[in-house]
Image (cartoon, rainbow, N blue to C red):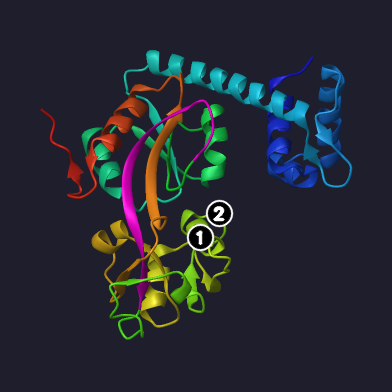
Amino acid sequence: MMDLGTLKQFLVVARLEHLSRAADELRIAQPSLSRSIARLESELGTPLFDRSGRLRLNDAGKLFRDHVERSLGELEAGRRAVAEATSEGLGTVRLASETFLTLTGPLAAYKRAHPSVEIELHWSPAEDMARRLRAQEVDLCVASQPIHTEGLESVQLLDEAVGVGMPLDHPLAGRTSVSIDELADQPFITAGKGHWLRRLLDRLFAARGLTPKIVCESDESAAIAELISAGLGIGLVPAFARRSVMRVPLTWIAVDSPDCRRRVTLHWGAGSHLSTAARLMRTTITSWNWITGEPRETR
């Protein structure tokens, strides 16, 4: 009979589609993990993975994965609901985001208003957020790029232009706007693959049949700005960062493309039980004024 441990192991293998990496993450021997997956498939009466070449989750595996995620998520929600009901505090809130730079204002306001709440912050790429919400590993997710999936509710927080930052003495620095074609041969400093900034850069260039010339990848936004200012390249910079945190001398120029934008959205699981702490966090974030950097006035 399948147990919770086996189901959790299956989810890791399904996510990584690689037995040895899954065994390393689970800290168990690979032969033991292989036997657990084989027993699970035997109990279900069907293979869950295609094993011709690289390990791949098959259609039956994807169907089973979705049910397991929801089931384990409900068990975790039940555990947290009981803990909240039997304690005097507000509980814990778990927030995942691609970047926390945008969220420092509402997070600080929330902590001041609710100092006893434990806040767990998780960095997460957008493509992993739906799974984490379904499995109720996190309560809320903030994405800077679209998440197209069922079973989520969402509120758009911010829709802003993304421009290009360049050194003050750059030949294009005097322009009010530039096109993607004009940036085709420019050296770019950007985030690593999977980060929303890198995905936006790749999409903009791919739409023109181009590939950006990337000379540096970094997930440190401050380092990207400093390297651009030092004259080592140019890079995409969201308007929010330009007006709120950028302290290095850069020129910010609009990109002549309607798609060069960032749409920040808050997501949570449809029908999922949110703790009091998570509901208060959702209210704080959705009521935040991103222009003034303060909570919106309520009447």
Give residue 31's quadrant in the image: top right
Residue 252, position as x, y percentages in the image: 30, 70
Residue 198 — which label? 1
Residue 222 belongs to magenta span: no
Q: Using the image, determine if residue 153 lies above or below residue 168.
A: above
The amino acid at mark 2 is Gly
Left or right: 176 as drawn, with respect to 72:
left
Residue at point 38%, 45% (across, down): 264
Residue 134, position as x, y percentages in the image: 55, 28
Q: Which residues are magenta?
A: 147-166
Q: Tell me the SS state at disc 2.
A: loop
Given residues 290 and 179, the one toward you in this image is: 179
Given residues 237 and 229, the one toward you in this image is: 237
The reply to whether discs 2 and 1 touch (Cβ–Cβ < 8 Å) is: yes
Residue 194 — which label? 2
Is residue 91 visible in this depiction of the protein?
A: yes
Residue at point 69%, 43% (across, down): 25
Q: Using the image, determine if residue 95 lies above or below residue 225.
A: above
Left or right: 217 as drawn, with respect to 294:
right
